[in-house]
Amino acid sequence: MNSVPVYSTVLSVLACLIPPYALRLTRVFGTKRELESQVQERTAQLDSANDGLQREISLRKQGEQELRKSKDGYRFLFDENPLPMWIFDLRSLRFLAFNNAALRHYGFSRAEFKELTPADLCVPAELDGFLADCARNTVIGQPRRVWRHRRKDGSITEVEITAHDLTYAECPARLVLAYDVSNWRQRAQLSLQPQEAPQAA
């Protein structure tokens, strides 16, 4: 007879307990869905950022390849230019770069030319003028000057120099292009000499 009240009490207790548990489970599942949504949103942001990074890396690689091609192209134009060209350090006067035409024109090997300076090419009478010229900045459009240089065999060549100051290998430097005018000046001098009058028969 006492079992009925006991069962009634148990059912009443369970009836009181179920709503709080159900509410707590609802809150737990609600938080999980919000977390999943935040994770999905963050994942989408990271994917978008990763795509942007990949595009930036691709563009940077393309830029580096184009820059490398451009440098190679300029290097080829320098090395294979038919006119003698060189770059020298304005402080030490040592050669930083020179092309094949310079070696051919002056008759030195690559190792020999590398040990020289532009001052070594000058004739003694023009050395002071060359050093003074190195102390002045080049100006675009300035008149070109003709210098007398010595080749390895001791012969003198007259070259018209075009120069441009720049920074090369983190050094203040000067790019020089030398145009041989020896033959042209010799012909010009000969044309100025008075012609002998023809002898009468």
Image (cartoon, grey):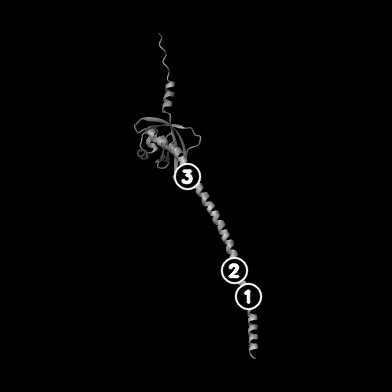
Query: Residue tagged by mark 3?
Result: 68
Q: Amino acid at mark 1?
A: Ala
Q: Amino acid at mark 2?
A: Lys
Q: Residue furthest top?
A: 201
Q: Residue furthest bottom?
A: 1
Question: Which dot marks residue 22?
Answer: 1
In the picture shown, does residue 21 fall above or below 85? below
Between label 3 and label 2, give the one nearer the viewer: 2
Q: Quadrant of the C terminus?
A: top left
Q: Which residue shows up at 49% across the image and 46% down it?
A: 65
**Neighbour class for label 3 at 10 Å: few (<14), some, many (≥20)?**
few
Query: Residue tagged by mark 2?
Result: 32
The span from disc 3 to disc 1 (Cα, nearest Å) is 68 Å
Q: Earlier in the sequence, mark 3 or mark 2?
A: 2
Quadrant assignment, res 174: top left
Say which element carries label 3: helix
Q: Earlier in the sequence, mark 3 or mark 1?
A: 1
**Neighbour class for label 2 at 10 Å: few (<14), some, many (≥20)?**
few
Q: Which residue shows up at 51% across the image and 49% down it?
A: 60
